[in-house]
Amino acid sequence: MMSLRRMKATISYDGTNFSGYQVQPGKRTVQLEIEKVLSKMHKGEEIKAIASGRTDARVHAIGQVIHFDTTLSIPNEGYKKALNTQLPGDIRVLDIEEVDRDFHARYSAKGKRYRYIWYCEEVQSPFRRNYTVETKGIKPDVKKMKEGAKYIIGTHDFSCFCASNTSVVDKVRTVHSLDFETHSEELHMVIEGNGFLYNMVRIIAGTLWEIGIGKRNPESMEQIIASKSREKAGKTAPPHGLYLEKVYY
């Protein structure tokens, strides 16, 4: 009998044409595409690809992490090549390695880093339309956004930045850092924390954007967090500006 191996893979995908990571009936998802290839490699056997967390439709990943169990004795580089040969072009395996059987892509994760990108020129490049959020030339006050961001750093109940349809009860999370970077015509928000609630990064991005364009003042962030009310925070920023950049273990 062949021994079972647990494989950890770091993957990248363009979320444009996916209905998210998680398998959904009748929809194209990242998990579905990966599991189809794994099943083919295992002669029809069902192989589950468990991710560090699900991403929504049109959200991208630079460094998503998954794990799956296999009976195949293919070397790591061979496994990587075999998967990339058969996967569609909008998913790529960047790295793969065998790990201990108690490793879990989701439950072993210690933290994550996300990046959110706005395109701040009047005319957005057509080549960036699926990867940055168009502002139609609106340039926010980044200094004020940074002031508002200071209130988010630390451990808080982030109920105000969580989609109301979540089943998660404990909404306390720790945000380690939140920075802004300017890259030519793009504004990037980079946030790291020990974990994030459903839509949390996009709601934070939407709220800080409203501060940046003068709809709110930076100090209002303190009251928003204290309220624990989703209604007090800003709009959920569009999905295609969001990237899961790194998962920490």
Image: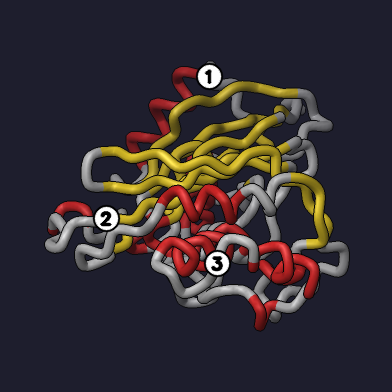
8 left or right, relative to 5? left
- Measured along the vertical axis of the image, is residue 116 above or below residue 193? below
- Residue 83 is drawn in which quadrant? top left
- Measured along the vertical axis of the image, is residue 5 above or below residue 246? above
Q: How many C-alpha atoms fall within 10 Å of the one at disc 2: few (<14), some, or many (≥20)?
A: many
Q: Residue 68: in sight, yes or no?
A: no
8 left or right, relative to 186? right
Residue displayed at 76% across by 69% down: 159
N-terminal of the two: label 3 or label 1?
A: 1
SS at badge 1: helix
SS at badge 3: loop
Tell me the kind of residue under disc 1: Asn
- Residue 108 is drawn in which quadrant? top right
Tell me, yes or no, whether the two marked residues, 1 and 2, touch with CB atoms within 8 Å.
no
User: Where residue 122 sits in the image (x, y, percent)?
Assistant: 15, 62
Residue displayed at 45% across by 54% down: 242
Residue displayed at 12% across by 62% down: 123
Tell me the kind of residue under disc 3: Asn
The residues bearing labels 1 and 2 have C-alpha atoms spaced at a distance of: 38 Å
User: Where residue 174 sits in the image (x, y, percent)?
Assistant: 77, 46
Labels 1, 2: front one: 2
Marker disc for residue 194? none
Q: In front: 110, or 16?
A: 110
Which residue is the site of mark 1? 76
N-terminal of the two: label 1 or label 2?
A: 1
Which residue is the site of mark 3? 217
